Image (spheres, helix red, strand yellow):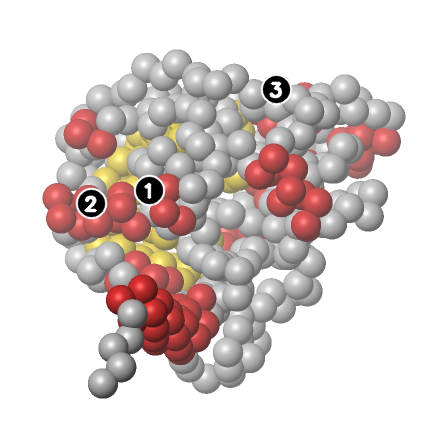
Amino acid sequence: MTRIPVALRRAGAILLWATVAACIVAVIVPHFLDRSYYRGPVSGHFDGGHFFNPDGDDDRISTTSGGSRIRFMWRQIFGDATRPVWPEHVAVTPAKPAPRVAGGRMVVTWVGHATVLIQADGLNILTDPVWSKTAGPFGFGPKRVTAPGIRFEDLPKIDLVLVSHNHYDHLDLATLKRLSERDHPMIVTSLGNDAVIGNAGVKATALDWSQSVAIPQLPGAQVSVTRNHHWGSRWFSDRNRALWSSFVVRLPHGNVFFAGDTGLGDGKWPAEAAALGPIRFAAIPIGAFRFEEGQMGSGSHIGPQGAVKVWDGLGRPRALAIHWGTFRLSREARDTPPRMLAQMLACARSDPARFGSVEPGGSIEVAPLGAPPPEPDLIALERCERRGAFAALR
């Protein structure tokens, strides 16, 4: 009987297991990369398989000079010597919030990026919580330049968490798992994202635009999921399998609005949110808007100019500028968004104290509801832009 050499047997075994592994990968990986996070009836923003923006899907990274998404991704991975320099690290003085805020007061603390702690009416609300050091899968992705403005250990007990969509810089499974294990908060998100969050063994309530859910800890309080203009994906091929949203938290002493991550779109959605009741406080993104020189906004991200329009559509509440200076996602310098916002508000003859910025760890006390300030002069703002008043800000 002829004996098969050991080396040949090993080679055959390796080939067999490689074939088995390839078959498993061929079966599993496509489903893993393109999961159907949600199944439901067709609607004005869901075609039965994918969500879309009803005001037009100009939600991909767009450029002013014909540049491509591939070129942008190449620059993100391998660097771009032409873009402004960011610091390697920004020092932060972490805040230590009070356990609760009651008696009609409202205190807001910026943790960083889109993570905001809102304390009002005895509730502790946290938006898009991210404490991870990178924003991406398996520890890869943009690195955190600015540490969280509140140490996780110093967070008060969280009652309500809002998750706007499934991008890694907004839906951080590691942080959600820590919060769930420590505080068991109510987590509210938009359709399909509950399946993503469930991968960490965490339960979330998923709603469609215009749907609401009661907050058990505070009688009469509600969370409403509202429209904005964005997109969603965790991988390359699961684009728009889950919905994106903004939120209105309806509270006894005035509502809270969280814009999530958004472009301007048709610009009508802020008024839709304001129609749910007077907004006392709004968290509005202003950064990651420039992917080519000279851009003032992209399809999926508003810059300061779009943020002023959103703020105006909301009724000009007390607002905090978010989504800047934490993760480097675009071409502008770290502090360009807040500097540009201040200049634009001055040009529009608006009170910069009504819509401003703080560094992570900074807090603001939000005054009770009152008469809204005068409307910004958007025509004057457009004239300033045409004159190149903001062109020097990179």
Looking at the rendering, in which quadrant would you find the N terminus?
A: bottom left
Q: Quadrant of residue 202?
A: bottom left
CB atoms at circles 2 and 1 under 8 Å apart? yes
Name the residue located 80 percent from the left edge and 30 percent from the top edge.
385
Residue carrying label 1: 129
Task: Note whether residue 205 is visible.
Answer: no
Q: Residues within 10 Å of mark 2 (few under 14, many from 20)?
A: many
Q: How many marks?
A: 3
Q: Secondary structure at mark 2?
A: helix
Q: Nearer the viewer, residue 98 or 64?
A: 64
* x then y, percent, for residue 70: 68, 50
Name the residue located 74 percent from the left edge and 50 percent from the top edge.
68
Q: Nearer the viewer, mark 3 or mark 2?
A: 3
Name the residue located 58 percent from the left edge and 38 percent from the top edge.
77
Residue carrying label 3: 85
Residue carrying label 2: 179
Please report whichever mark, 2 or 1, sits nearer to the chain's N-terminal start: 1
Q: Secondary structure at mark 3?
A: loop
Measured Cα–Cα span from mark 3 to mark 1 = 27 Å
